[in-house]
Amino acid sequence: MDRASLLTLIESPVGAWVACGGCTVLLVLVGVGFWRLVAAADGASKQEPPVSAEKKPKMPVSTPEGSEDVAALRSLQPTQWLQNLYQGLSKTRDKWLQGLGALFVEGRKIDAATLEALSELLYRADVGVRTTASMMEYIRAQRPEGSQISEGEIRGWMRQKTEALFTTLDKPWNEATAAGMPTVFLIVGVNGVGKTTSIGKLAAHFLAEDKSVLLCAADTYRAAAIEQLQVWGQRLDVKVVAHQQGGDPAAVCFDAVQSAVAKKTDVLLIDTAGRLHNKTHLMEELGKIRRTISKAMPEAPHEIWLVIDATTGQNAVAQVQAFQEIVPLSGLIVTKLDGTAKGGVLLSIADQFHLPIRFIGVGEKAVDLRPFDAAQFASSLFPA
Ligand SMILES: Nc1nc2c(ncn2[C@@H]2O[C@H](COP(=O)(O)OP(=O)(O)OP(=O)(O)O)[C@@H](O)[C@H]2O)c(=O)[nH]1
Ligand SMILES: [Mg+2]
């Protein structure tokens, strides 16, 4: 198109219309660009401040795991648990049986030498002096002095004595007396014994019994401890009452009991901080926690369970002693029996403190923590 034709076109009505349309398009484009800039600036000003990993823990969002724990517990066959228990106690049993086998290479009689050698074996398996002595008394009473005895007979007498020892302590735990009120469990123990994981497993256990469960994070010293319980809460789809890190542990317990009462929850499980039994102020704090719980619900806590790690052997005896002086323990949870040859310490503790063992743990999974059964335990430790 030459210059003259172009001028004619611009001056014509059609040309004016095209020029006007071009301007409109241009204006719209400029407008959109401007609006985008404004929106971006506005968005930036509304962005949430960065949240530290400490405040916003990454939690598994999928829920099926929780139902898997509960489903696994519901479908756990008694024979399967017996196998797990037998396997879990293998280190303790092997140590004991190897020693016994060596003792009985040649025939044995009931005499001072045999009883001395048996005492030595039990003592080395963390059974403790006092319990070993009562075991020997029991064996001596079975046959007249000088009678021939077999390895199988010794195992049988040990089994009977062990079962009898635990059976006398076996009684149901306290529960809330009024219908619709929660049974409150306060779980205590030294650092790292397995309190929090046991609470997760206990929650799964109660859920498998169709009970409603609430968890309370009263280990307020470490954010990670609160998060650990919250992860269990998510995993099992159970609510967790928690305050800020550094808060008063007694206060969160008070809130949790009130919440459990208001919601008519069947079971409240309270996790506490690990405390060394020789740290006086921490032990006193435990006394305060207990008193505060009682203010929120006079008959609570219904049960105070000390968690002991079986791998610590005789040290667990000192722990029971120290905690018993501060709070009235009503039962024990024994964890990590799978990792130790020191399982004999349970006999020692039961004999000395007359405390029932409520649950025992032989592994990391929810199905690995089960109610304690005297006969099962005795026959896994001293098989026929
Ligand atoms: N093998 C084995 N490990 C266990 C058992 N019970 C707990 N554990 C492990 O022990 C470790 C400590 O468990 P936690 O539950 O954190 O112990 P805690 O008493 O709450 O620890 P603190 O809160 O730090 O005092 C974890 O790695 C658990 O998986 C068990 O029966 N067998
Ligand atoms: Mg813990």
Image (spheres, rainbow, N blue to C red):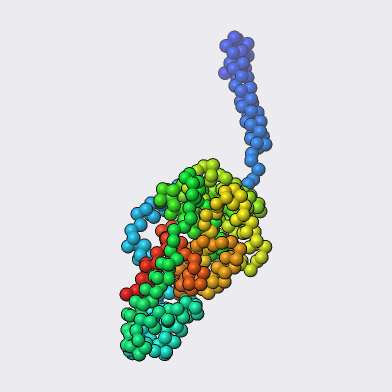
Left or right of 173 in this view: 97: left
Where does the image place residue 49, in percent across and percent down from the top left?
65, 43
Which sits in the foreground, 98 or 156?
156
The N terminus: image quadrant: top right
- Please give the name of the residue rendered at 59% of the width and 17% of the height, measured from the top-left corner: 21
Count of numbered badges drawn on the protein: 0
Where does the image place residue 201, in percent across and percent down from the top left?
46, 56
Which sits in the foreground, 327 or 263?
327
Where does the image place residue 107, in percent across and percent down from the top left?
33, 89
- Please give the name of the residue rendered at 49% of the width and 68% of the height, measured from the top-left corner: 354
Where does the image place residue 255, in percent across and percent down from the top left?
60, 47
Which sits in the foreground, 44 or 221?
221
- Please give the name of the residue rendered at 66% of the width and 31% of the height, measured from the top-left corner: 38
- Please give the name of the residue rendered at 57% of the width and 71% of the height, measured from the top-left corner: 318
The C terminus: image quadrant: bottom left
Left or right of 97 in this view: 303: right
Q: Is residue 303 above or below residue 158?
A: above
User: From this viewpoint, is residue 383 visible?
Assistant: yes
Q: Is residue 377 above or below residue 255?
A: below
Which sits in the foreground, 258 or 340?
258
User: From this viewpoint, is residue 53 visible?
Assistant: no
